[in-house]
């Protein structure tokens, strides 16, 4: 008993009866299984009974051997027990990595619309409610689906995503529900569908609005009856699957047009989560830019990339039809093409800088650097605000060392003061606009350098 705590073994082999009157082995088993991580436990006894074996297995014993046993039998049991504990440890590590990769903190944003999304995710993650995730392409719908799964009680089972628009109709039915051998040309073996693979876990149906009408009827039955039937089969099989769906289309409009079943829409739309477009959360752009730059390392210098204030302003002015995915790609491109660790205006894609006045991209940008705090601002769940992201000039650069136009000098001073007020309000633009007695739209234009 003392050695268990001292040595923390990988394997425990103990007799059930360490004397003829009391089963001390059960106490050792319970103490061993309470360790974290717990070792594999093999029980053996010369006074075996079915009741003792059942109790030992109930308490967590891997195997129960009855004396006398062959040495090869013991060796085989030891090998299997150690392989089992190794597999359990690897699965636990993989699960932790998946939760880290797809956890809530990977969804970046502090805008009010994103706060609504976070609150809804937290409320429904650990339930079995069907969720319909709405939003334009590139807004992070699959990231939300994975966060829902890996923060639920189903996290130990499979997460199975499928893009309903990526497969032709004749293959989609087989992929979803499986088929029997000979059900159609090419069906040379029995095959389980994705619903079967997701049993106990979650299936994510992306682009659900493109699903053919016939499959919509079959999916509706699955949601109602919680059972599936493979193509060419006559027997239904029960499944325990949570369904998450996503679409960038207006399903209500498709219902009115007769292109999507109304009853299926209501079955899917139990808990709707609407992802805002990037143009609706402009205030999150600096935080997202930092998030994408954090792990980018310039290939030539080996130093982390930074971004100039003017380049950041240009990013905030773009309307981002491709949403967060387009922003990430723009930062990836800029970090690769930049000739220094500082990303400047000319490093950005042409579509982003096309509205910048001629000659602006040639102006020096080294004095106006977007400084980010140590550690990622990440995302703020439910309450609080993220650490401020300052885009004000560096100390000592308020007075330029070279001669510039009076208009340019006044604009830089105005921008510095605006950023000072934003810092005081912890980047709360509405509060800053109120203190400055200007409209919120005017504040955005001034911070972006457009003036009145």
Image (cartoon, rainbow, N blue to C red):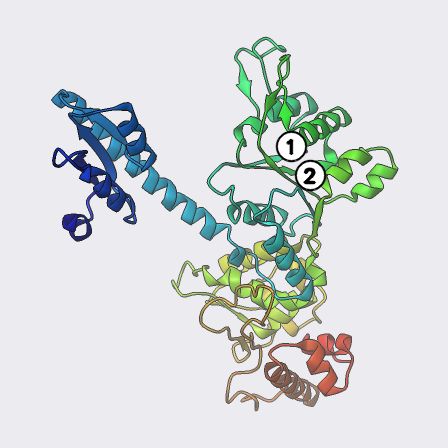
* Residue 356 shows up from this direction: yes
In the depicted view, which residue is nearer to us: 227 or 336?
A: 227
Q: Which of marks 1 and 2 precedes in the sequence? A: 1
Q: Which residue is mark 2?
A: 207
Label 1: how many residues lie within 10 Å, few (<14), some (14-19) or many (20+)? few
Residue 373 screen position, x and y as percent: 48, 74
Which of the two residues, 193 or 317, is positioned nearer the viewer here?
A: 193
Residue at image location 62% in from the left, 55% down from the top: 324
**Residue identified by numbered label 1:** 166
Quarter occupied by the C terminus: bottom right
Residue 89 lies, in percent from the top left, at 32, 42
Mark 2–mark 1 Cα distance, whole angstroms, equals 9 Å
- The picture places residue 220, in percent across and down from the top left corner, at 72, 30
Q: Does residue 214 lie above or below 16 as drawn?
A: above
Q: Quadrant of residue 382?
A: bottom right
Tally the numbered discs.
Answer: 2
Residue 324: assigned label:
none
Mark 1, secondary structure of its residue? loop
Secondary structure beneath dot 2 equals: loop
Residue for point 72% across, 87% down: 436
Residue at point 23% right, 43% down?
A: 27
Q: Are marks 2 and 1 in contact (CB under 8 Å)?
A: yes
Of badges 2 and 1, nearer the viewer stands 2
Left or right: residue 396 compared with residue 177: left
């Amino acid at each position: 008993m003392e050695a268990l705590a001292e040595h923390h073994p990988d394997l425990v082999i103990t007799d059930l009866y360490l004397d003829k009157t009391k089963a001390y082995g059960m106490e050792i088993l319970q103490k061993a299984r309470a360790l974290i991580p717990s070792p594999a436990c093999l029980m053996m006894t010369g006074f075996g009974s079915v009741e003792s074996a059942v109790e030992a297995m109930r308490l967590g014993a891997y195997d129960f051997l009855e004396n006398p046993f062959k040495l090869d039998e013991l060796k085989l049991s030891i090998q299997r027990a150690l392989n089992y504990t190794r597999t359990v440890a690897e699965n636990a590590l993989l699960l932790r990595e998946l939760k880290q990769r797809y956890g809530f903190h990977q969804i970046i944003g502090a805008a009010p619309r994103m706060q609504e999304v976070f609150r809804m995710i937290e409320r429904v993650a650990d339930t079995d409610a069907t969720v319909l995730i709405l939003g334009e392409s590139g807004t992070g719908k699959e990231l939300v689906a994975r966060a829902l799964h890996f923060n639920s009680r189903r996290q130990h089972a499979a997460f199975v995503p499928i893009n309903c628009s990526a497969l032709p109709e004749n293959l989609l039915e087989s992929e979803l529900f499986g088929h029997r051998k000979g059900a159609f040309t090419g069906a040379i073996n029995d095959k389980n569908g994705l619903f079967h693979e997701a049993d106990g876990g979650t299936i994510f149906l992306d682009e659900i609005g493109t699903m053919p009408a016939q499959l919509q009827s079959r999916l509706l039955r699955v949601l109602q009856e919680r059972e599936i039937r493979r193509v060419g089969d006559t027997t239904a099989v029960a499944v325990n699957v949570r369904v998450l769906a996503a679409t960038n289309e207006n399903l209500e409009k498709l219902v009115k047009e007769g292109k999507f079943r109304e009853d299926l829409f209501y079955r899917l739309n139990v808990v709707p989560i609407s992802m805002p477009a990037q143009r609706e959360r402009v205030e999150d752009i600096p935080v997202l830019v930092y998030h994408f730059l954090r792990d980018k390392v310039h290939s030539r210098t080996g130093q982390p990339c930074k971004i100039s204030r003017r380049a950041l302003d240009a990013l905030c002015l773009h309307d981002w039809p491709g949403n967060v995915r387009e922003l990430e790609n723009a930062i990836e491109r800029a970090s690769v093409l930049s000739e220094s660790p500082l990303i400047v205006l000319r490093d950005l894609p042409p579509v982003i800088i096309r509205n910048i006045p001629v000659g602006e991209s040639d102006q020096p940008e080294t004095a106006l650097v977007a400084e980010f705090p140590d550690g990622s601002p990440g995302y703020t769940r439910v309450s609080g605000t993220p650490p401020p992201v300052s885009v004000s000039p560096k100390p000592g650069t308020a007075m330029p060392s070279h001669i510039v136009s009076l208009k340019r000098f006044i604009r830089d001073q105005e921008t510095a003061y605006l950023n000072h007020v934003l810092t005081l309000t912890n980047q709360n633009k509405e509060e800053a606009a109120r203190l400055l007695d200007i409209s919120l739209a005017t504040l955005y234009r001034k911070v972006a350098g457009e003036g009145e």
